């Protein structure tokens, strides 16, 4: 059952994802027709603009010099920040089929290690992370994603409650594909927050493009009615920077 789960989830025997190609849109005929009323002959320009142009250039030079001086004095501070991303280790574990970047992170590689290091379990990510790698928005998403759902959960063939899933003391559980698609959507929601706010820490699971490719393939297979195997949720232990 575990092997079928992992194969159905798309992690065993991974194939390289193709890159999408984009092309520039060519300008259509008729673009620029708003200029058809411009006369073919224009009056000979006069040089009245020369003093204005000189004043404008001098103004730019003075403004640039003043801005540089104020910047050196520390008057201007950049608030944009620089986004840091964790290293995404290539390759998969041959036994589990799980990418290396999703294990052996800041919280160790087991629930016991994670708890000993004071880590927190995210129900959306199914991942143990340092507390400062998760936000109040992540906690809210935990409740939004699971709150009013009646998904089935089982571990090693035995039905379990949501409280067991919430605790994170397992390696993998079985559930429905509806859960799996919802998981993908909420993870993309988290990724959007990580991109908008440079102050947030980023983990090697949320930022791994392989998971996005996996989710896209999953949605396509579901929409095409190609999935009959049970879905599964695997616990991760990423790195956070």
Image (cartoon, grey):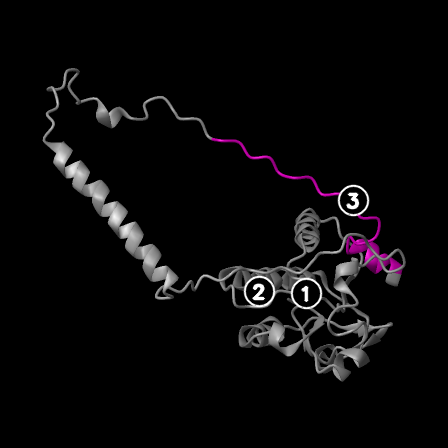
Residue drawn at x 79%, y 59% as measured from the top left:
100
Q: Tag 2 or tag 3, which sits nearer the N-term?
A: 3
User: From this viewpoint, is residue 1 visible?
Assistant: no
Which SS does the magenta portion mostly show? loop
Q: CA distance from mark 3 to mark 2?
A: 26 Å
Mark 3 is surrounded, within 10 Å at the Cα level, by few (under 14), some (14 to 19) or many (20 or more) other residues, namely few
The picture places residue 191, in percent across and down from the top left corner, at 58, 61
Residue drawn at x 69%, y 55% as measured from the top left:
211
Which image quarter is the C terminus in? bottom right
Judging by the rendered image, the residue that carries numbered circle 1 is 179
Judging by the rendered image, the residue that carries numbered circle 2 is 190
Mark 1 is surrounded, within 10 Å at the Cα level, by few (under 14), some (14 to 19) or many (20 or more) other residues, namely many
The picture places residue 240, in percent across and down from the top left corner, at 66, 67
Q: Residues in magenta?
A: 3-24
Splitting the image into 4 quarters, where does residue 176 fall? Answer: bottom right
In this rendering, which labeled residue sits more in front, label 3 or label 1? 3
Q: CA distance from mark 3 to mark 1?
A: 24 Å
Q: Secondary structure at mark 3?
A: loop
């Amino acid at each position: 059952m575990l092997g079928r789960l992992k194969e159905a989830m798309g992690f065993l025997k991974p194939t390289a994802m193709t890159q999408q190609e984009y092309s520039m849109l060519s300008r259509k005929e008729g673009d620029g027709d708003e200029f058809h009323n411009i006369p073919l002959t224009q009056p000979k320009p006069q040089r009245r603009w020369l003093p204005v142009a000189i004043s404008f250039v001098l103004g730019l030079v003075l403004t640039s010099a003043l801005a540089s001086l104020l910047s050196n004095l520390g008057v201007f501070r950049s608030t944009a920040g620089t986004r840091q991303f964790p290293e995404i280790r290539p390759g998969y574990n041959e036994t589990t089929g799980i990418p290396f970047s999703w294990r052996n992170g800041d919280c160790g590689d087991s629930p016991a290690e994670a708890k000993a290091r004071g880590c927190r379990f995210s129900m959306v990510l199914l991942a143990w992370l340092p507390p400062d790698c998760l936000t109040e928005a992540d906690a809210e998403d935990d409740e939004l994603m699971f709150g009013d759902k009646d998904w089935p959960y089982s571990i090693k063939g035995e039905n379990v409650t949501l409280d067991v899933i919430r605790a994170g003391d397992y390696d993998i559980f079985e559930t429905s594909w509806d859960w799996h698609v919802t998981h993908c959507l909420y993870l993309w929601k988290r990724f959007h927050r990580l991109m908008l706010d440079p102050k947030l820490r980023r983990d090697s699971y949320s930022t791994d493009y392989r998971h996005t490719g996996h989710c896209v393939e999953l949605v396509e297979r579901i929409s095409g009615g190609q999935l009959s195997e049970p879905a599964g949720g695997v616990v991760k232990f990423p790195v956070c920077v």
